[in-house]
Amino acid sequence: MRVPATGVFNANNATSSATRRGLDVTNAELQHENAPRGSCEVVTSPPVFTLHIELFHYFCTETVKTLEASSQGATVPLPVIVTHCLSTPYLMNELLAFAALHLSIVRPMQREYYHRHAMQLQTHAINDLKDSGCLNINPENCVPTFLFSSILGIHMLCETLYFHRDDLSSFLAKFIQYASLHRGVRAIAGTSWSTLQSLHPDQSWQNGSHSASNIGSCRIRRSLLEKIHGAKLGPALTKHYQQAIELLPFQTQAADQPPEIAPCHSVVAWPVLVHAEYLDHLSHGRPEALVILAHYAVLLHHHRQFWVFGDGGRWLIERISDQLGLDWESWLAWPKMAINTD
């Protein structure tokens, strides 16, 4: 899917507006931009506007293709995204941030440079969202708010999987922070769901929700539920774990069969859909909560060709296995098999 050449020029105008609202343009950079042509100052990085146009172009020509491929066709058309981001600073900043994150992964020699801009642009996007008054969803802001929530969720999960691997504890802290922040943004965007469907019934809006029907037919899920109930953890803890397990978006009939797994948007949604109590148990490092997370990591591993996930699923399963040790070997049998039978 391509964008007419005019899209880049429109992006320049819109990005200039977004920049005035808080993008990282320093006085020194502005002075250099207006300096006489004869100046001999050495330029060590591209002008900020050039960078933003580069990111916008990369999103429209490369990043969006990966989103389409990973969603099995259930995506919002690129012209819709472009139309709304050009008039919505927080969406534009997040779109640019996501493109910068993508470049930080596919261009490892420039990882630090693009990752730094990805973090800066995302911070501006979140601040712009707070200043936009989007807490009151209406027909004018429902689409950009929904798009922002969707891109932000994928962005933050990718950030967590790639850049917070010092140890399992550090990863879990960032993962829980990601889930909590995305939960808050999603709560705002969720109020736009009925408005979106009524205003644009022809579009494919995906809220990432997963039906828990036919739970009993999935042997892997049923086996995990049986272990949880057999552990006699008490009604409250068992309920929290059961809900998290039932929301895992896969159906597998037998342990020796590959999983039938939902598209990536459902995988991204799981950390936001689980109850906050499960995340609390995860933050305390409870073994059962880690086992459930290892089963979620199988979903990430299944979609490992999607750059957002990469080898994050494998890394997570291996770290959880190391943390729990041999006593939990039987609980982790399926996740470990999933990464060892490729």
Image (spheres, grey):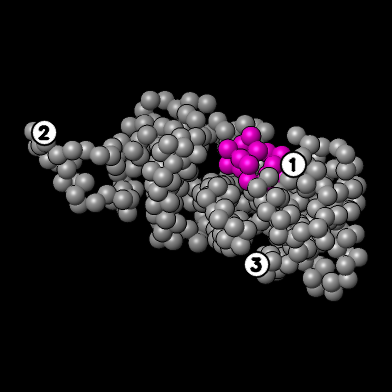
x, y percent for residue 319: 68, 53
The residue that label 3 is drawn on is 283
Q: Looking at the image, tell me whether mark 2 or mark 1 is earlier in sequence order.
A: 2
From this viewpoint, is residue 125 visible?
A: no
Q: Nearer the viewer, residue 31 or 4?
A: 31
The residue that label 2 is drawn on is 37
Packing grade of label 3 (10 A; few <14, some 14-19, many >=20) is some
Q: Image point 71% across, 39% down: which residue?
A: 302
| Amino acid found under the numbered disc labelled 2 | Arg
Q: Quadrant of residue 171?
A: bottom right
Q: Secondary structure at mark 2?
A: loop
Magenta region, mostly helix, strand or loop? loop
Q: Looking at the image, tell me whether mark 3 or mark 2 is earlier in sequence order.
A: 2
Q: Image point 21% across, 38% down: which residue?
A: 43
240 up-or-down from 208: above or below: below
- Residue 247 falls left or right of residue 106: right
Q: CA distance from mark 2 to mark 1?
A: 58 Å
State the mark number for residue 339. 1
Stretch in magenta = 299-313
Packing grade of label 2 (10 A; few <14, some 14-19, many >=20) is few
